[in-house]
Amino acid sequence: MSRSRRARRAHRAVRVVAWAALVVVACRDAPSAPNAARAESDAGQWRTWVLADGSALRPAAPPAPGSADEARELEAIVQRQAHRAVSDAALRRWSGHPTAPWDSVALGTLDFYFPLLPDVRLATPVRAARVMALLHVAAYDALVAAWDAKYAYRRTAPSATDRRVRALVPAGDVPSYPSEHAAVAEAAAAVLAYLFPAEDTLAFHALAREAGEARVEAGAAYPSDVDAGAAIGRAVAARVIARARVDGAAEPWTGAIPAGDGLWRPTPNKFVGVPFDAGAGGWRTWVLPNGAAFRPTPPPAPGSPGFARDVAELRALSVGRTAAQADVARYWATDAPSVIWEKFMLRELADRGIATVHAARAQAASSVAMYDAFVACWDAKFHYWVERPVTADSTLRTVFPTPPFPSYPSGHSTISTAAAEVFAELFPDAARTYRDKATDASLSRVYAAVHYRFDVEAGDTLGLAVGRAVVQRLKDDGAR
């Protein structure tokens, strides 16, 4: 099938991506309610990413206890519970972390697009990391703003106010106004609709409406809680999208591929002529001052002893690769590396029962670290334009086709080491586990014969610098 036909088929398939992802979400039980005893009452004061501070979007006060407005809302909830319109599955979906369904939607959408590379470039390594960073920054800032208002007003949930209102899901001990689920839902829906602008982005907004309706019908939120949370989410999304519009990702690359010995050329088997995201090294970063902040020193020159040594290692692997080495190589190539690390994060959050805003903080920090690491890596790749091993020696047998962009440094090494440093700060008892995973990610590219060892060593050093910069921001963000 020609590339143009594949691209047209992919475009038609876009119309069902969001709904397919939502079906996956709907068929899963939601995670258990996050550590309800941990109220995180100071989270509204934590450092934000796009808001000036947590109070920047504080809504007006909710209806006063005992007021006629409150009574009308309570009566409306009683009637809704008597005539249920929201399914039990939807109630469960919105009974846990407010970000969880949106993680599933984003990851499901990226998983759909990943096999369509190179024809449809919405899930390239750098762009996948950008999606997750924008989503998680929006969710985190929306939650910080919601927590600021929650503890400014301290409104009691409907099910704890009126005995006629049943608690259909655990309400926890967090004030209900504004609704955190509505805040995250509106922020996430708007950001994902911006990132994946297809007709069925309406599905994102339908899911957001369901989140609010489910919380009201469950007795966990008043309609005014949902309205206030939704307004916060939309305002946060507007700021995140405004930043995304000028971060450089939409700018076409107008450079030229340099020619010369040792420089990158299109590689088998597709010989993609325009490398992925060649301008990404100039995209706006979140923590680093720019992509060149930690640019590595030049790699070994072609023909040098260091270069010859690393090519010889790949020749030996090409004919003597073990089954275990091939398995490691394939595992780390099944998805964009940021998606693999995001799944590690979701498992940690679920296993540890991390509270709501702490969980969002962890996801934002790790996603930002991976995005900034990719920008830094792409700056170096397109500064040095180092040829891939299969260009240096066409007899090499790779485990899978060589990715269509320059070799030095390794993206898997850079972002995995950066992510592992953030994981080590957040989950110190598991630091060794995640640093070992980063090592596996790095070695996987050598085992596959798509990177030289000097690529992964430079990537490890670069990723460590990026990870430490993000960890320092975590230390200074006010969270306990």
Image (cartoon, rainbow, N blue to C red):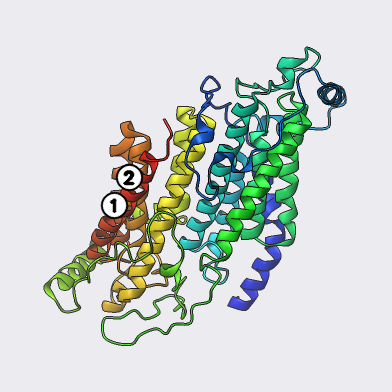
The three-letter code of the residue at mark 1 reads Leu
Q: Which residue is mark 2?
A: 421
The quarter of the image holding the N terminus is bottom right
397, above or below 464, in the image: below
What's the mark number on residue 70?
Answer: none
Q: Which residue is mark 1?
A: 464
**95 displayed left or right of 42:** right
- Residue 304, visible in the rendered structure: yes
What residue appears at the point 76 percent right and 23 percent down from the top-left corner? 64
x, y (%) of residue 435?
29, 44
Q: Quadrant of residue 97?
A: top right
What residue appears at the point 36 percent right and 63 percent down from the top-left corner? 376
Of 186 and 400, nearer the camera is 186
187, above or below 5, in the image: above
433, above or below 341, in the image: above
x, y (%) of residue 460?
27, 55
